[in-house]
Image: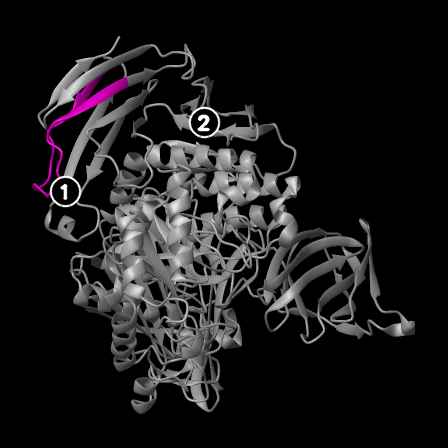
Amino acid sequence: MKFLLIICITLLPAWALCQVYQKHTVKPDRLSIELSEGVLDLIPLSSMAVRVQWHKGTLKETQHLILVNKLAVPKFGVTTTPLELKMSTSSINVRFTKKSGTLTFADSNGKIFLQEKAGSRRLNADSVLGEKCFVAEQGFLTMPGESLFGLGQFQDGNFDLKNVSRKLTQVNTQIAIPFLYSSNNYGILWHQYGLTYFNPSDNVVKLIKRDTTAGGKTDAEVTTIAGTQKVSQQQAVYRGEFKIDHDGNYSLLLDLGDMDNRHLVVINGVTQIDQSNLWLPPTAGKLVALKAGLHTVQIVCKATNTPKLTWKPADDITTFRSPQAKALDYVVFRGNNADEVIKNYRNLSGQVPMLPLWAYGFWQCRERYTSGNHLVETVKEFRKRNLPMDVIVQDWQYWGKYGWGVPKFDETNYPDPAGFIKQLHNLNARFSVSVWENLDKRSEVAKDYIDKKLYIPNSPWIDIFNPETQKTHWNALNHNLFANGVDSWWMDATEPENDALTGKQTYLGLGNFYRLIYPLFVSKAVYEGQRKTDPQKRVAILTRSAFAGQQRYGTINWSGDIGGTWDTYKRQIVAGLNYSMTGMPYWTTDIGGFFRPGRSQYTDEKYHELLTRWFQWGTFNTIFRIHGYQSETEPWKYGATVENNMRTMLNLRYQLMPYIYSSAWEISSGSSTMMRPLVMDFANDKQAVKQPYEYMFGKAMLVAPVTEAGVKEQMVYLPKFTVWYDWWSGTRYTGGQTINADASLEKIPLFVKAGSIIPVGPIQQYTSQKPANSLNIRIYSGANGKFELYEDEGDNYNYETGKYNLVPFYWNNAARTLTIGLAKGKHFTGQINNRNFVITLINGDKAVATGINKQIKLHYTGKQLITKIE
């Protein structure tokens, strides 16, 4: 051992000495490797997932908050040579190199898909507020051509995250989930609950503040190649410079320390980061191509914040760093595609329950409805105008005299909560209500929390980590809201707002260690509380923040208080697609933006165009919802043209409900995601993987939302290896090309993959209005296809015991035969046993609008049918 130590001292940096191999032990559930300092455990969680933990001393994380499903230990073997150890499952081989201490991950054929960077594993002792911790860090080699996605929802506009620097915190409009997916078909869960830096940039640019009132002027000026920008006295201008030695790409991270309203970074007169909104996250990252030499920087932010700008070369090393950790801990997931990786991740962190059928309809929301009568009359107007809608939402301040955030209706404007909610139900609408976790401590409702000491000390936020708080909180919601008929929960500010856990003592311990996980526990409290109170009513929670594993609690996330601009809208598409890569399937935005142009929004045709395009894209979000600050968001408020265009998209959404609900079943059975970045289905098409504003909606439909004003035609890339059909015209295209698609104002570019089978239902005003006893089944020829039509009772959990109906469809393209298989599942109330299918074959010879090649009618009773379609 002494000789080995001398060799290691010669070959390794001083800080790496703590990882000198000593011995190893094979235990029933792991390979345990003793190092000079600490123990490195390789733990197979399944045949396709391996957990890596490095502990030093007695400091360990005792909370198991993400990987809640303990599966049977898979079969694994360990082989050893003088140079390495190898642990193997049926799908993953993990090699530990004794000389360098690094891990290499390969598939069952020995093909390497992930490697640690030699010497990058670090666990340096530190402390926070007197408590011991470590700075945990691990670097991985990123392969040429590899793309990376996930990490949650960010507003910086980055799609492929390779080399991008980020600071993972929970704030309004930003959701931090430390799960990363690679185009090489693996995922990494960085298993930490506290602050994490992704690709930390450690080179600091020295900045000097410029007085915005210098020279007696009311505004300062920033000069860019796009012209001079004026800066108000409420903002500050900083200047600096930095020098680099080599040409190349560099990763920048702007950190303003707190929420801001301005992100402006100008380098050498070129604007690199530029956002304005009432709320912006503290940080934004950007990859920038720079030449060797000296570079000047100008930054604009709120005058009350102090900016920090850091940089690093884009070195193709992917690094995670958690400055307040108790151990180094990560999990590697392997699969043949993204669905397999995410399925494996959900198997361990929790499957996704079905949302109620009505949740997939349209959600009407605004800031805000002012009375129970206001809500009822709005729903009546939707019904009168034949505008489909399923959910109406009550935003904040319904509590009135009871105090801020108190979950109780003020009878002044809501004199009979149960009564007006019953009226909504009679109109076939569901009701969702806003709830906060910082309810006024002076209120009567808060007394129970205070008596039990359930607030975080020196904080307005309840300590939701405490099981007693969870029970108390649900009891308050149940007594004041759920008992009156509330259908759904809008859990606002669940970050909690402004990253408020740092420096606070919580039930779990110091908040610094748990600052990312508050939203997980809010969702847990509501989900478990409602299911216990009413086991037959599905939980639907709209919430502003999330953490890994939260998908198991019936949650939907939205992108927070965003602005109403074209640039912001484009960023939401990227944000939503990356969010969907973290195993979280349900996501939406405030259609039209939360912060809008004021009264001009109702007459401004330029804003109407943005609103229309955003609404079209919202039709193809997993959840379809509009919202706006101090705005009347109802379609008719914007004139007949906007209303008619919205009605067109609403009708299409409801016609696609059989397809959408069946896609939701694929999610809940553990194998799918609805909003699918093209990497999920076309990982071998490098051009497709790069598309930030195109995605699959389900596994059949490609959506290419219009993201610029004045567009009538739009360039759309159609992925290789298949044939595509224009949804609107039926025109057939060969994949692997960019086409100029029709993007007239009333249409969103929409395409269907060959081999797809899409059920189309009737136009209806709410999801349960008409029985699905007659459906149009569209078959898109050119490839074999299959689809399973899923139905259940719509708003209970009987499907968990098999009470559902699954009708399989198979298209054999060469034989031109459609097989409708034997229906599967247990009988349920309302099940349709006799139905008519109108089969429409589409092959591109004629437009859908003017005629189709073949259309036949079939009567189906649940038994197999085989039909040839020439």
Place of residue 754 in the rendered image (x, y in percent of width and height, measured from the top left): 36, 23
What crowding class fits label 2: few (fewer than 14 Cα within 10 Å), some (14-19), or many (20 or more)?
Answer: some
What is the quadrant of residue 60 in the picture?
Answer: bottom left
Q: Which residue is mark 2?
A: 720
Residue 804, disc = 1
Q: Which residue lies at the image location 17% right of the left edge and 43% below the top edge?
A: 792
Task: Work out whether residue 223 can be spotted.
Answer: yes
SS class of the residue under badge 2? loop
Place of residue 333 in the rendered image (x, y in percent of width and height, measured from the top left): 33, 54
Place of residue 592 in the rendered image (x, y in percent of width and height, measured from the top left): 54, 48
Please state the extent of the stretch shown in magenta in the rendering.
Answer: 817-839
Q: Disc 1 vs disc 2: which is toward the camera?
A: 1
Q: What type of secondary structure mainly makes up the magenta span?
A: loop
Q: Cα distance, mark 1 to mark 2?
A: 36 Å
What's the residue type where badge 2 is placed? Lys
Q: Which residue lies at the image location 50% right of the left edge and 70% below the top edge?
A: 12
Q: How is the image coloured?
A: one colour
Question: Is residue 213 shown above or below 782?
Answer: below
What crowding class fits label 1: few (fewer than 14 Cα within 10 Å), some (14-19), or many (20 or more)?
Answer: many
Query: Which quadrant does the N terminus fall into?
Result: bottom left
